Image (tube, rainbow, N blue to C red):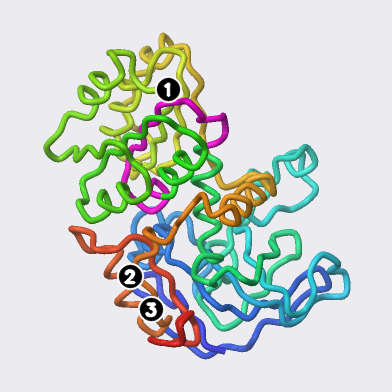
Amino acid sequence: MIALRKTRRARGAEMQEIPIPDINPNEVLIKIQAASLCGTDVHIYQWDDWAQSRVQQVPYTVGHETTGIVVKKGSMVTRVEEGDAVSVETHIPCGHCKQCLTGQMHVCQNLKILGVDTNGAFADYLAVPEIVVWKNDPSVPPEYMSIQEPLGNAVHATLIEPVHGKSVAILGDGPVGLFSAGVARASGATQIFMTGIEPFRLNIGKQMGVDRIINVANENAVQIIKDATDGLGVDVVLEMSGVASAMKDGIAMLRRGGRYCFFGIFKDNLVPTPLNDIIFNGGRFYGINGRLMFDTWFTVSNLLASKRLDVRPVVTHKLPLANFEEAFELMIESPKKAGKIVMFPNGTMANGKH
């Protein structure tokens, strides 16, 4: 099969021909239909400090947000059949640690991440344990089934507590922030703000239901939000940017007793933080890692099936996997001209066209 491989501890990746993977009794073999590009993939492609410290095995196949058809199943597999359309939860749990045994598989003590710790999905075929397989509605186009993993991040962050009747500020205009806007709107949020610096993506935010776009390159987000909420601040802040200044603004714009979610990954682990402001706020501060297995997946599936959440504006590009360099450069370049990019291993899009 053909796979996109990280072959050297340096910038870039290469298409290679490698054997189709064998499967264990508890695994399935999936013929990949579509796989979407994530910021994590970009870190690995650029081979930045995070990737150098995180990725242990090279060479290996990259990619993790994916969907496909089960073409073979192991003797112990019972939940899916050959021919089923599936997506993949990227957090691979051990199944026997304290977290796994108490309903917290998504933060398993021995967690492995697909496409980071194991061979990934930018390939013709993928072998994964049955525990991470999610059965899809086959009527949904592959490009939208492939983005359920990042959409699940947005659902987990946005709905870890209810948002109906609440004001919500989303800090960051990347794909997960854009998905969060749609989730908040579909779930009854009454006032949605989004901050960012990329006009192309902020415009997508409007399409996803944001009431007030704030370009922090030339606007004061804290003042605008305080003015719009009678000086109180918002009920909910979703920090999706991983930018220290945005994180601090988020704490300043959160009403007392509100809810704050950290999702964006910061370039540096040690970031100056106004801890006294957090203490005296008296609110609830969450770290968001992955998706609840599988509560979040049920919510994602239900939102998509209801048609109340339309993710089409976020998926801006569909490319053959062979054009991976174009896809990565679209993600890297600034100003941004892409939202979510989906790649197709066989080079054929959902409509049969390149």
Q: Mark 3 points at which residue?
A: 319
- The x, y position of residue 160, in whole percent, is 57, 34
For the residues bearing labels 1 and 2, Cβ distance under 8 angstroms:
no
Q: Mark 1 points at which residue?
A: 235
Give the mark, 3 or 1, whose residue is nearer the N terminus: 1
Residue 277 placement: quadrant: top left
Residue under label 2: 328
Residue range in magenta is 159-178
- Where's the C terminus, which quadrant? bottom left
Instruction: Report the front residue among 312 and 134.
Output: 312
The local crowd at label 1, few if under 14, some if 14 to 19, many if 20 or more residues have their Cα within 10 Å, is many
For residue 99, above or below residue 45: above
Q: Which amino acid does label 3 sit on?
A: Leu
Q: How crowded is mark 3: few (under 14 residues within 10 Å), some or many (20 or more)?
A: many
Q: Residue at x 35, y 41 (%)?
A: 242
Q: Which of 189 and 325 is in front in this view?
A: 189
Quadrant of the frame with the N terminus: bottom right
Residue 196 is inside the magenta segment: no
Answer whether residue 239 is visible to the viewer in this image.
yes
Which mark lies nearer to you, 3 or 1?
Answer: 1
Viewer-closest of 57 and 189: 189
Q: Give the amino acid type for the residue marked by disc 2 in the picture.
A: Phe
Please name the residue shown 27% across and 38% down the image.
195
Furthest-left residue in this view: 218
